[in-house]
Image (cartoon, rainbow, N blue to C red):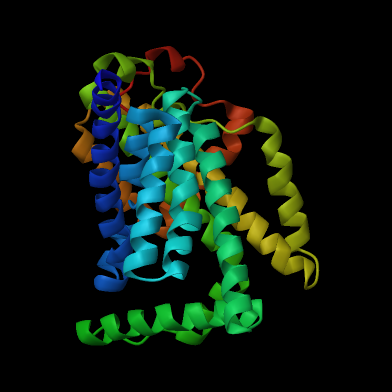
Amino acid sequence: MERIFAFHRAVAPLIMEAVVLGFFSLILFLATSLVPIVGFALSLFAPLPLTLLSVRRGLAGGVLGLLFLFLLLALSSSLLRAVSFLLEFGGVAVILGEGIRREWGGERAVLLGALGSGAGTSLLLLIHMLRFRVGLSDLIDKQITERLLELREIFAKAGAAPTSWDSLEHFLLQSYPALLFLSILFAAILNYYLARRIRGWRNPDAKQKDRPFSDWSIPEYWVWGFIFSLLLYLLPTPYKLVGLNLLLISSGLYLLQGMAISLTFLRRWHLPTLLKVSIFLFALSQPVFLLLFAGIGLFDVWGNFRRGLSGKSTSEG
């Protein structure tokens, strides 16, 4: 009997934490269908509660939270929705949690998490293709059309001037794989660094060991991927389309590096965190700054702009 009580004392808190954090993750996941546009922004943080669970309770805790959510969605909604959550958000949550717990470093954890989520999303697309008996291009066209219709309604209610929707739709169709991966990468970065920050509030000793985002650095040899994608883009179709998607992905990675470098210099001015976030949000809304950040990240391969500043890094970034 004593062993039973000991087992209960050890397992009950884990189950309770898995249920509570899993429930918050479920709310964020369902936000897309409940609250258009704003709900999409909230759904980006759906992996966060499970990531925190993995950090606190290890791999077993993360898997337990996933199992709870899978069963809850399968019983209350549908098996397809449960599988959708598992493939889109489950893997990345556990990978990011393990990355933080094992101190992998931001680049490795985020890229592995994004690749895991990308593989899951690709498998989910395949499931939809088989279920609805449609081709990949038809499925992508349907998803893009639905999103554009939502945007048109918002623009119409706001009284905004009409935009060239046809050219936008054409671009989205051509660059869908790259934009999908970049959105997954962006979500992985948000969840990774936010989970690390929350852990740092509870455990100041762990915070001191974390490398800040301003130390983000991708290998120098990745520049050959950028050059290769640029050469493909200069060739006729279909190589041009492959080059476009690879170029967008590599540019997105160098955009992150450029932002990290810029943050390194911003931190020398000791600005408040909220002000730094506001500056970056404004900069990211301006195309010229996006190009500037990507250019800084690319030319850092040769310029090494952070040389001599790495020793001044702290965990604030």
Which quadrant of the structure image shows residue 218? top right
Residue 66 versus residue 111: which sits nearer the camera?
66
231 with respect to 308 (left or right): right
| Residue 206 percent coordinates (x, y) | 33, 17
Residue 125 versus residue 300: which sits nearer the camera?
125
Residue visible at 74% across and 41% down? 224
| Residue 219 percent coordinates (x, y) | 64, 31
Residue visible at 78% across and 73% down? 237
Quadrant where the N terminus lies? top left
Residue visible at 26% across and 66% down? 38
Q: Is residue 36 visible?
A: no
Whether residue 114 is situated above or below residue 44 in the rendered picture: above
Quadrant where the C terminus lies? top left
88 with respect to 124 (left or right): left
Whether residue 92 is situated above or below residue 219 in the rendered picture: below
314 with respect to 142 (left or right): left
Whether residue 65 is situated above or below residue 311 in the rendered picture: below
Which quadrant of the structure image shows residue 146? bottom left
Residue 112 versus residue 5: which sits nearer the camera?
5
| Residue 229 percent coordinates (x, y) | 72, 54
Residue 8 versus residue 310: which sits nearer the camera?
8
Residue visible at 44% across and 52% down? 89
| Residue 314 percent coordinates (x, y) | 34, 18
User: How many dots with numbers?
Assistant: 0
